[in-house]
Amino acid sequence: MKRISVSQEEMKGLVERVAAELKRRLKEDGHPQTFAGISPGRGARNAKKRLLVIGTLEEEERKTLSDSYELVRQEEFCTKDWEEAHAQDYELILVASLSPKAMAQVAHGISAGGAAAGILQGLMMGRPVFLLERGLEYRNYKDSASRTLYLFYQKQEEVMKHFGIRFVEHTMDILDQAKRKTGGEMQRLADLTHLTLLQESDLIRARNMGCRGIRLKEGAKVTPLAMDYRNSHGLTFFWE
């Protein structure tokens, strides 16, 4: 049998033609295209916003969100590099569970893969990140861990809040914050007119709820830390 030699350029051209034909047939059949481990874009599925879930949601939590969002599990993404393309394929993140190890990695900015890598990459890309408080695993050790160690992890919570991670008690809180965000600027104001002394922790809570404006009573005092937080996070004071 006579052997047919094929040059490298000819082989490359053949592969490209086969790939192009495959794409064309997939498109005609209505099947979404998936390449290099990256999920299909939003247009290939539906108009819902894509919510990346890190950890496991309970059934009721999943039902609460599924009407408004297309839920995507972290396992559907390649967690080795978390390249920019991945963050472009979802619009917000929900952390349903976070181990003490991953929590410490996030608080120290260590993108070591898994949950920490997904959270940090999402923050870097400007994606909203929500965290269910019941998913903080370190809290399960309150009665057995040493006080010093437990306080250490409590401080990591504050660090993550400074990063912009929004702590929520229920999945319904995510929907409520989304409604406030689309409901106009006045609905994104935090009413703190009852305070005579505004502290940094007050602003952190307001920002975690999606507020960017703060209503204050004329004459209220503002601590230096609160002023620094306002300036670094672009919050606006409205005096009444």
Image (cartoon, rainbow, N blue to C red):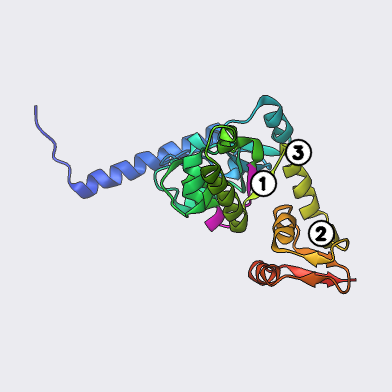
* In the displayed structure image, the side of residue 50 where residue 82 appears, left or right: left
* Residue drawn 55% across the image and 46% down it: 153
**Relative to residue 139, is residue 200 depicted above or below?**
below
Count the labels in the image. Answer: 3
Q: CA distance from mark 2 to mark 1?
A: 16 Å
Query: Mark 3 or 2 closer to N-term?
Result: 3
- Classify mark 3: helix, strand or loop: helix
Q: Which residues are magenta?
A: 123-131
Q: Which residue is mark 1?
A: 167
Q: Judge whether residue 54 can be spotted in this image.
A: no
Q: CA distance from mark 3 to mark 2?
A: 19 Å
Amino acid marked by disc 2: Ala
Residue 192: x and y in percent read: 84, 61
200 vs 232, nearest the viewer? 200
Q: Secondary structure at mark 1?
A: strand
Residue 16: % across, % down? 34, 45
Amino acid type shown at disc 1: Phe
Please rate how many residues cluster around mark 2, counting C-alpha atoms within 10 Å: few if below 14, some from 14 to 19, many from 20: many
Q: Amino acid at mark 3?
A: Met
For the residue pair 237 and 127, the one nearer the viewer reads as 237
Question: Mark 3 and mark 1: span between their CA atoms?
Answer: 12 Å
The residue under label 3 is 172
Where does residue 171 sit, x and y in percent of width and height? 71, 38
Q: Quadrant of residue 5?
A: top left
Q: Residue at the location (83% across, 54% down)?
A: 183
Look at mark 2 in the image and give the residue it sits on. Answer: 190
Q: Which mark is residue 49?
A: none
